[in-house]
Amino acid sequence: MIKNRDIVVVGLAALDSRIGSNVINLAHEFAKNNRVLYVNYPIDRFTMWRDKNDSVVQNRVQRMKSDEPNLVKLEDNFWTLYPATILESISQLPANWLFDILNKINNKRLAKEVNKAIKRLVFTDIIVFNDTDMFRSFYLKENIGAKTYVYYTRDNMIAVDFWKTQGIRIEAALMAKSDLVVANSTYLAELAQRFNPNSFYVGQGCDVSIFDKKLIATPPIDMEPILALKKPIVGYIGVLFNLRLDIEVLEFLAKSRPDYSFVFVGPEDEAFSASELHRQSNVFFLGSKQMEELPAYLNYFDVALNPQKLNEVTIGNYPRKIDEYLAMGKPTVATKTEAMSVFAEYTYLAATKEDYLALVDLALKENSPEKEKAREKFARGHTWEANVNEIYKRIEQIEKA
């Protein structure tokens, strides 16, 4: 375990945003034994204009104009920095030479703010932990004089159109020059190894404390009519977006098993709203729920699903929802991907819609209290502490080499 070090965390997630992220959980775990400076990403000119009515952007602009401190202590060992700078908007520039010139300028602006903070905090012997901030933090190690630079890959970002113009080139170069690359899926670790042999799978943390059958007293009101049908319930919890989920698989299942109830909990995109699923009498869309409500729905599923589409965006993702499903002991059928290989012993993995149908039936047939306990134990081992310990182990390896 690494203790009493100074860690600068940068990335694509800001503490003042409305969306949680792996890196925020990891940073809080780092801070249990080390001093952590969490750097919120600075805004760029285009974002400041485009999202001028967004509360996050407004707060950032107001903070730069006011006397409000930009270095804030949130808890013991944990500070956050709101960089008092604006960056140039360069991600879509097609000319490599121009991008590189402006990216160096952006990096210097960010590093100037970080250097002010680490001077005030008297940070030394610094570890940089970079959560996929491939552009703004490309030169951060040299610009702040850090000892060790760790690049964290948790999504195949360059498969997304926004990142392709410069990300394909820049992320490969950043991985190559990093001291260490860590990934939350085996697939992403293998991609990274093409550029840096010091690339490792370190697992994924997940707080499943609320996903506990013992905490569920009664079913949600909108589940009661479905339970009254006394049919096996096959369900999915999460965002229902066509980019990530295979509607064809779900339609095939619902039509093939009219004696099962299919329950979907989460917001839908237009493709799902227009799908045949809404015309199936055995399909129920229950809409978005608060995070703390989700276990009560999952508790009444007989089988849980994660019918991912296979594409460049999804193939390497670590599916945190699988940990949530398993933490409540649920038989789970999911799309077979390389990232899902770590769950192979505890889930049913399907390659086709016909596989899905057969495996849902098998999951219902084979379930037992013993299997449920094994799933729960496995999922509850995927803690943030275990995840961070794997990262520490790899950092120690690199620093001792």
Image (cartoon, rainbow, N blue to C red):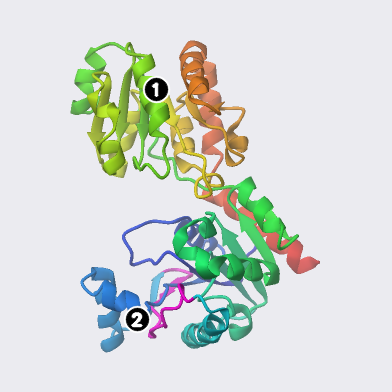
Please name the residue that numbered disc 1 is placed on: 252
Please name the residue that numbered disc 2 is placed on: 45
From the viewer's perspective, is residue 84 above or below residue 27? below
Q: Which quadrant of the figure contains the C terminus?
A: bottom right
Q: Give the range drawn in magenta.
A: 75-93
Q: Which residue is drawn at 25% across and 31% down?
A: 285
Judged by depth in the image, the label closer to the viewer, 1 or 2, is: 1
Please state which of residues 182 and 5 is positioned toward the viewer in this rendering: 182
> Is the magenta region chiefly helix, strand or loop?
loop
Q: What residue type is labelled 1?
A: Phe
The x, y position of residue 231, in whole percent, is: 31, 12
Q: Which residue is drawn at 63% across and 66% down?
A: 150
Q: Quadrant of residue 213?
A: top left
From the viewer's perspective, is residue 216 above or below residue 270? above
Please state which of residues 237 and 115 is positioned toward the viewer in this rendering: 237
Please state which of residues 151 and 63 is positioned toward the viewer in this rendering: 151
